[in-house]
Amino acid sequence: MKNKFSLYIFAASLFIVGTACGVRLFVWGLDEIEMMSTSSSIVLCFSASLAFFALGCLGFMLFTFGRGAFLRIEDGRVRARYGMNRTLDIPISEVEDVAVIGSALRIFTAKNAYTVTAPASKEDVSSLVNCGKKPWDINERNERAAYEKAKRAHIVAMTAVCILLASLVLNVVLCSQLTGGKAPSELTPEEDVIWLAFYFAALLAIIASFFVADRAGKLTLERERRMRRIDSYMGYMHRYDGVDTGSTQRIVLFDSYRIRAHVKYIYGSFVFDMELIDPVSGEWVLAESEVYDTREEALAAVDTKLGNAPVNEDKLFN
């Protein structure tokens, strides 16, 4: 409730400040037209006004964030409403993988990835997870090749973003030198043309950087998709490596075999361990460990730690 109230305060602030500044700059732009000011001053006023109006719209949209959110599977389709009135309606057959990230679900299809933060039943989450590619059907070599390809493309995209951002700084420096560092309203007609040319060049660089950054974000998701498959394959192939059946009380594999939790009896105590698979070595890496006095407490810790995470395999030894 506290977080929701803070969101409303932030949204209201954005709406009020954005709208007020947008109106003021728009009026200022009209005044500049009446005074026959330079084109640079007029363009700058209306551009700044548009930017602040966009902030005001964002504030207004934030009021609806998470309202009426849901995720459910019905009639063979995944339907959801989340975020700022975003919706999802796709056939469940298109789902290739699902990552459970806290209270959010990241749903991967062949072309897109959706991060859905909405209430969902354990049964629906399990159904989605079961739609993922099975570990025994994964071609590890192809997945690693695809991961490396996405990684290289991501490096290229991020390099392009850095170049575009550096060009913005260079743009400002060159424009300032060629116009003598004057304010837009003080420019001569010749300097006004130079300022406008640099302004639109900067605008194009900003737009291009957004598109390239969006591409980099998609490549990041593609890398995550490929690495999750590699983790799943490696976890399945090594799911019982290093397990001492004589001391192990229970072992649970979940998140498509990427994580395992098990309870061991060691020197009169019951040890709960949670491990993550290392996709390079195929070894299990300890992520969390706790010691309990009784077997019941340790076994209960498994269910507590997993919460609603769908279990792929659950094995009892004793």
Image: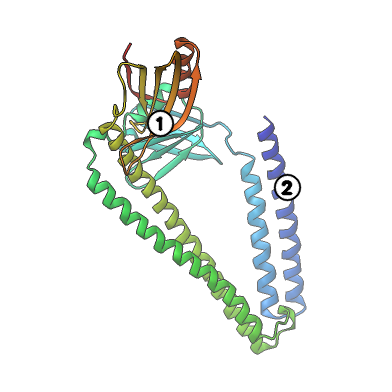
Question: Residue 6's image quarter?
Answer: top right
Q: Of residues 227 and 107, which is closer to you in this image?
A: 227
Q: Of residues 201 and 292, which is closer to you in this image?
A: 292
Report whether 134 appears left or right of 210.
left
Q: Residue at x 61, y 84 (%)?
A: 194
On the image, the x and y values in percent for residue 290 come to 49, 23
Q: Using the image, determine if residue 99 lies above or below residue 186.
A: above
Q: Of residues 103 and 22, which is closer to you in this image?
A: 103
Mark 2 or mark 1: name the one nearer the start of the chain: 2
On the image, the x and y values in percent for residue 232 come to 31, 36
Q: Residue at x 57, y 80 (%)?
A: 197
Residue bearing the label numbered 1: 275
Q: Using the image, determine if residue 243 lies above or below residue 43.
A: above
Q: Residue 13's mark? A: 2
Per the image, label 2 sits on a secondary structure element best described as helix
Report whether 18 appears left or right of 106.
right
Per the image, label 1 sits on a secondary structure element best described as strand
